[in-house]
Amino acid sequence: MYASKIAEVDAFSDLIRGVRAHGSLFGSSTLSPPWALHFVDGAPLTLCTVLTGAGWIVPEHGPPEPLRARETIVVRGPATFTFVDEVGTRAEPIACGEHCATPEQGGTRHRRGWNDPGGDTGHGLGGGTGDGPGGNSDDGRDATTLIVGAYPVRGEISRRLLDALPVVLRVDEGGTGDPVLDHLAAEVAIDTPGQQVVLDRLLDWMLVCTLREWFDRPGGEPPAWWAAQRDPVVGDALRLLHAEPAAPWTVAALAEQTGVSRSTLAKRFADLVGEPPLTYLTRWRMTLAADLLVERKAATIADIARTVGYSDPFGFSAAFKRVRGANPSEFRRTATTS
């Protein structure tokens, strides 16, 4: 028997759940021109925002993008990018990544809890004097404070979110992320227990706000599953499928739960999502199964099959190969080796 109240689980929440700032690079640098920070790790997602000042994001394969105070840009990897004071800057690029964790290597002040509370290091970019977090210029007028969060993206679920994003997306100030920026500015200016946890969660919050703003931008073309969530019928059907993916769903059962006829649900779902409800469900189950095959190494194929709603492991294996191009055992072996 299905729940009478539709659970508060949506496609976006499921897709972004594996994109977390925990263990990722977090940097707060106050820079004086000229500067050029080359982010070399090619993280799946990197969020860049400036609290004060301005600069340019220069993707490895793309035109430069201006980044002004309280604007946010998200860069999708694996390509690298550079943050510069101006296009064509005379500054020598400093490689930022695993070694960009100390003022001597570019001014980053926070990484996995690392913190250097104030004081002149003598090595900040642009000859900073240490007036405030990360160093500053002599009079503070030309300083640009950059916040960077590099996100690891784990699993096949979150990759569906990456597939919906361009290489570079930007969001202007004045949106729902502004209060988060205020919190970030306050947090990077202090040194207190639990700071890294707070910064990680603020970055997660900032990323969610940024992606929602970008998906909802006027004239934008969000992915079908994003727009469909707003439909009173199809949105409810999607929440049901994501809340209980292993349930024995039929189009008739979904229609009954959403309060419309079977034909109405089937047509509206296909029109808005781009595929029939049960085709969407199968692809979502196989995405869940792909992650479970890697995460649960001791689980058998039959165990995974039951978890995603298949009583017959042979039927599950056939569906998995049809959707993923390899049977579950081959996929697990290849993914584990990789």
Image: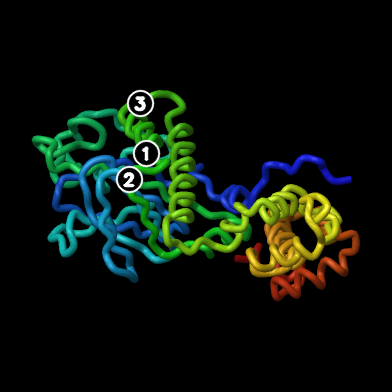
Q: Nearer the viewer, residue 290 or 294?
A: 290
**Residue type for callout 3:** Asp
Q: CA distance from mark 3 to mark 1?
A: 22 Å
Q: CA distance from mark 1 to mark 2?
A: 7 Å
Q: Which comes sooner in the sequence, label 1 or label 2? A: 2
Which residue is farthest left?
A: 139
Question: Which residue position holds label 2?
Answer: 173
Q: Quadrant of the C terminus?
A: bottom right
Q: Quadrant of the N terminus?
A: top right
Q: Would you say 241 lies left or right of 124 here?
A: right
Question: Which residue position holds label 3?
Answer: 191
Q: Would you say 312 lies left or right of 130 here?
A: right
Looking at the image, is mark 2 or mark 3 nearer the viewer? 2
What x and y, as percent, mark residue 200?
Answer: 46, 38
Q: Nearer the viewer, residue 174 or 58?
A: 174
Q: Are marks 1 and 2 in contact (CB under 8 Å)?
A: yes
Task: Answer few, some or many: residues within 10 Å of disc 2's Cα (few below 14, many 20 plus, some between 14 and 19).
Answer: some
Q: Looking at the image, is 268 positioned above or below residue 17?
A: below
Question: Which residue position holds label 1?
Answer: 178
What x and y, as percent, mark residue 71?
Answer: 31, 48
Q: Which comes sooner in the sequence, label 3 or label 1? A: 1
| Residue at 83 percent of width and 66 percent of height | 316
